[in-house]
Amino acid sequence: MIRHPNPRHAMIFGMIVAATLSRLLPHPPNFTPIGALALFGGAYIDKKPLAFAAPLSALLLSDMLIGFYTLMPVIYVCFALTVLMGFVLRKGLRVGKLAVLVVASSGTFFCVTNLAVWISGTLYPHTAAGLLTCYGAAIPFYRNEVIGDALYATLLFGTLAAAERVIPPLRKKDGLLRMGESSVL
């Protein structure tokens, strides 16, 4: 018996793949789709292990091509926290709520990763002034993070919402991606 992919699952899977591949294109530091993918996965993939696996696998696959780095565990924890934030969107997706979560996820990433840089590195003295200098030096990266997360979240959530309006098989009553027998994921 041939299984036909669920159009909604195929659409979401395709969007995740496309966003992941965009990380491989030249881009400013921290201007990547992974934060938006984590929110998107948390919002639309109902099986929690898969909601975490989609963005974290995307990150791992692209890291395998780009190269590994010392703070990988911290980065992955930050994006896992972003998946958890995406769960809030399951109760109803509103533009304002999405905007708050984009800023919150970017802010969490900024705070946690720069604290890890300060703690684990030798670039900044382990003093209050060194910590402030570390955070100050990271502000341009934070700006890129917020802009990238906002842009990619707009593309991911907006594309799915627009497609649902014009392609009836993509519509799902509760908005969650159900991982069933006809799933391609």
Image (spheres, grey):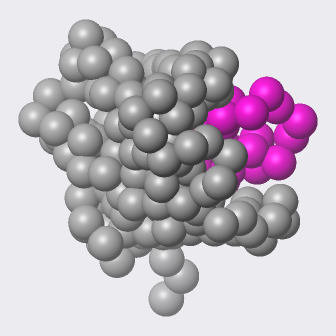
- Who is closer to the viewer here, 9 or 27? 27
Q: Report the side of 13 relative to 161 (left or right).
A: right
Give the x, y percent position of residue 90. Answer: 18, 40
Number of marks present in the image shown: 0
Magenta span: 16-40
Figure check: 119 above or below 145: below
Seen at 65% across and 66% down, the residue is 70
Is 62 covered by the magenta stretch?
no
Give the x, y percent position of residue 72. Answer: 58, 65
Q: Is residue 37 visible?
A: no
Figure check: 171 above or below 94: below
Give the x, y percent position of residue 133. Answer: 56, 26
Seen at 49% across and 77% down, the residue is 3
Q: Residue furthest bottom?
A: 1
Seen at 47% across and 28% down, the residue is 129
Indicate the quadrant where residue 96 lies: top left
